[in-house]
Image (cartoon, rainbow, N blue to C red):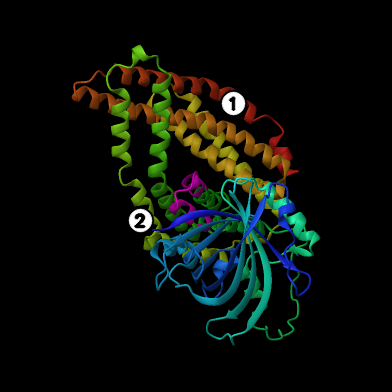
Amino acid sequence: MAETKREIERKYEATGDDVRLPDLTRVTGVAGVVDKGVAELDAVYYDTQDLRLAADSLTLRRRTGGDDAGWHLKFPVATGIRDEIRAPLSPDVPRTLAALLRSRVRDTQPAPVVRLLSSRHVRHLLDGDGTLLAEVSVDAVRAERLGPGVPGATAAWTEVEVELADDVDPDLLDRVEKRLRKAGLRPSHSASKLARALAETAPEAPDAPVVPVVEKAPAAGKATAGDHVLGYLRAQRDALVDLDPAVRRDLPDSVHQMRVATRRMRSAFKSYGKVLDRTVTDPVGEELKWLAGELGVDRDQEVLTERLQARIAALPRPLLLGPVRGRLRIWSVARRSGSRRKTLAVLDSKRYLALLDTLDALLDGPPLRPAARRPVAQVVPKAVLKDYDRLAGRIAHALELGPGGPRDLAMHDARKAAKRARYAAEAARPALGAPAKKLAQRMKAVQTVLGDHQDSVVAREALRGLAIQAHLAGESSFTWGLLYGQEVATAADRERELPEVWRRASRPGLRERLLA
């Protein structure tokens, strides 16, 4: 069973050969320093042959010695902050940790790349009550490069590591650093021991042959439309890979953000069909649609349940007839049963891994069309405006219809068009600047109104089902009918708001600014 620990630490190196710690009881808040002795640590770090984990600042190691022997997988959170996921010692990489690496390593098995032998001298910094504030370690490290084709290069150094204890104010690290700097220590140039070991034991590259320059790269500000679109798509591909372990760990909002990345890629394939051949990208887009749909089962149910819970919470008690909250809870649990397990199964499926491989291949050898070689300003604004015009047509159609099912469907289609126009504008922002940002904001406002309308449509269908269940169980269906009526009123409100929201979003001058 894996456990997670948030690790907040800083590393230092000496300017000379001798590493001596200053008197840390002079740090404000530190009342005592307790010597915990020396531990001998033996850690083997694993990665792919092309060091994919190291490239993303991830570390996977098997360590013996010390009080936390076992497998450790570290994910960067921010500078000096990492989440360390631990698993018990075993001969091979534990399945729980291997799953968190799957989007990066795919079918490749991580293998040993570096061995670190560290002699760690540990001190504990305590407050006046004897509570642990931080652990200060002086590590004498010897690194050995492992793996095929590597001649066993070694490196050695000494570093100081200060790790904050749980629930301690991070300001303590600043105060400790001030004392360490006065003693001649400086922040380490390497983010981790592994990074330093890889750098200092890397095999020397052979002299590269001189290759004549045939074509210059585009000057700053003159990138091609292909450069722009591919840069955006690579960012979304990278987001998918990065979010995979977050979804597996069930981190907040991770599923939603992963779905957004799939939608943005799919939308870009459609919006920039003049740049990338859609006969190649459309099948990939369908696979992205499949992934977003699979990921959405749990999230959509969660959003719907929260909406209905809020409706119930707002009702006066006399209007809650029957076991309304219990009925909703039973309904929600039944619909979400196994959804988490299904999400993990999707991420472990051959179809999903094949999609990631397909995206890599597509971006490494993109099916560029002639327009991809043209300047951004000649291609991207027109693509954005095409999506905008498409939305305008769907809005006009929806507003022509009277209330009812056909209008609900038309507004749902308009919502999808608004989302696509927004994504196209967001993708164009690095190239077009403020006009694209303004358009994206306007499209988001339209999408919000249309989205709430669609949510009311989905909620009404759910409430109708809940009313039927209550009736068949001999319960009152009054409250469910009342809530249904509220959703009808909400939909009507959004329909009345839409013309004004669209009028503001489609103010004159937008087209000219985008094309300027």
Start-end of magenta stretch = 241-260
Question: Is residue 250 on the magenta stretch?
Answer: yes
* Residue 231 place in picture, x, y as percent: 63, 58
Front position in the image: 290 or 486: 486
Question: Is residue 31 on the magenta stretch?
Answer: no
Q: Is residue 301 left or right of residue 62?
A: left
Query: Measuring 68% from the left and 84% from the top, which residue is drawn there?
Result: 204
Front position in the image: 111 or 493: 111
Per the rendering, the mark at residue 368 is none
Q: What residue type is disc 1 on?
A: Val
User: How packed is label 1: few (under 14 Cα within 10 Å), some, or many (20 or more)?
Assistant: some
Q: Is residue 188 left or right of residue 289?
A: right
* Residue 483 place in picture, x, y as percent: 37, 20
Query: Measuring 40% from the left and 17% from the top, which residue is drawn there?
Result: 315
Say if mark 2 contacts mark 1, CB within 8 Å.
no
Whether residue 93 appears in this view of the structure is yes
Whether residue 371 appears in this view of the structure is no
Front position in the image: 493 or 347: 347
Residue ranking furthest to the top = 318
Gap in angstroms between the C-alphas marked 2 and 1: 41 Å
39 shown above or below 271:
below
* Residue highlighted by disc 1: 501
Image quarter hosting the C terminus: top right
510 shown above or below 280:
above
| Residue at disc 1, secondary structure | helix
Examine the image and state in which quarter residue 296 appears. Answer: top left
Per the rendering, the mark at residue 345 is 2
106 shown above or below 393:
below
